Image (spheres, helix red, strand yellow):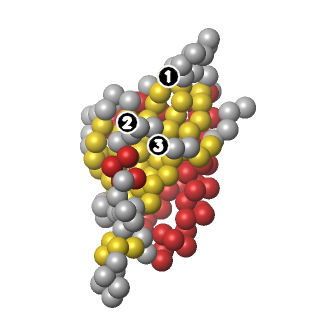
Amino acid sequence: MATVRACDLPTNALLTVYSHDPGCYTDCFSTEVTKDIDLSGYVTAFYTTPLFKLERMVLKLALAKPSTDAEAQQLARSQIDQFAAWRVEDRTDEQLLMCDMSGRTRSWFKVESVAGSTDPATRLYFGSAVVPVLNKRSGYRTLGFGFSALLGFHKLYSRALLSASRSRLEK
């Protein structure tokens, strides 16, 4: 059974620009699927997992940012550039970088064929960035108490989302 593991960002990752910004938080997780998966299939699976649908429900109720499975598919196919509380910041054939409505967080997706595999296999990457803000009292850029307090949950949730996506794609 494939596992989700923390890893370094690939050198060509769209998220890399944030990892070079002092004070920015970035992470990267990966897993493998024993199929050929394109970015559209991965993004659709991610945003339509039962786990992420809970987040979509919270966004609908708390921020009046509803979204549908059909919109997730449209985003994945490059037919729309906004989805729930996010907008597309950058996109390639293998990667998607999303920015939240506050401009503070990024979500990043990447698919990569696994080299040397006799059977088709795809490595799925999921990463995040949190951009610091200026603390007017101290004069320093900081992530803030809220994110720092939730960092452990964020890492666990990121792994769970990637695992749920992998499970959906393997069916």
Callout 2 amino acid: Asn
Judge whether 106 appears above or below 44 on screen: below
Observer-side mark, 1 or 3, equals 3
Say whether residue 140 is left or right of residue 161.
Answer: left
Give the residue at mark 1: 113
Circle 3 packing at 10 Å, graded few (<14), some (14-19), many (20+), is: some
Q: Earlier in the sequence, mark 1 or mark 3?
A: 3
Give the residue at mark 2: 12
At 40% from the left and 53% from the top, the residue drawn is 19
Which mark, residue 47?
Answer: none
Q: Residue furthest top?
A: 118
Judge whether 79 appears above or below 50 on screen: above
Give the residue at mark 3: 9
Circle 1 packing at 10 Å, graded few (<14), some (14-19), many (20+), is: some
The residue nearer to you, when weighing 24 against 161, is 24
Secondary structure at badge 2 equals loop
The residue nearer to you, when weighing 76 against 6, is 6
At 34% from the left and 58% from the top, the residue drawn is 21
Callout 3 amino acid: Leu
The C terminus - image quarter: top right
Q: Earlier in the sequence, mark 2 or mark 1?
A: 2
Callout 1 amino acid: Ser
Give how far apart the Cα atoms at labels 1 and 3 are.
Answer: 16 Å
**Is there a contact, CB below 8 Å, between mark 2 and mark 1?**
no
At 37% from the left and 36% from the top, the residue drawn is 12
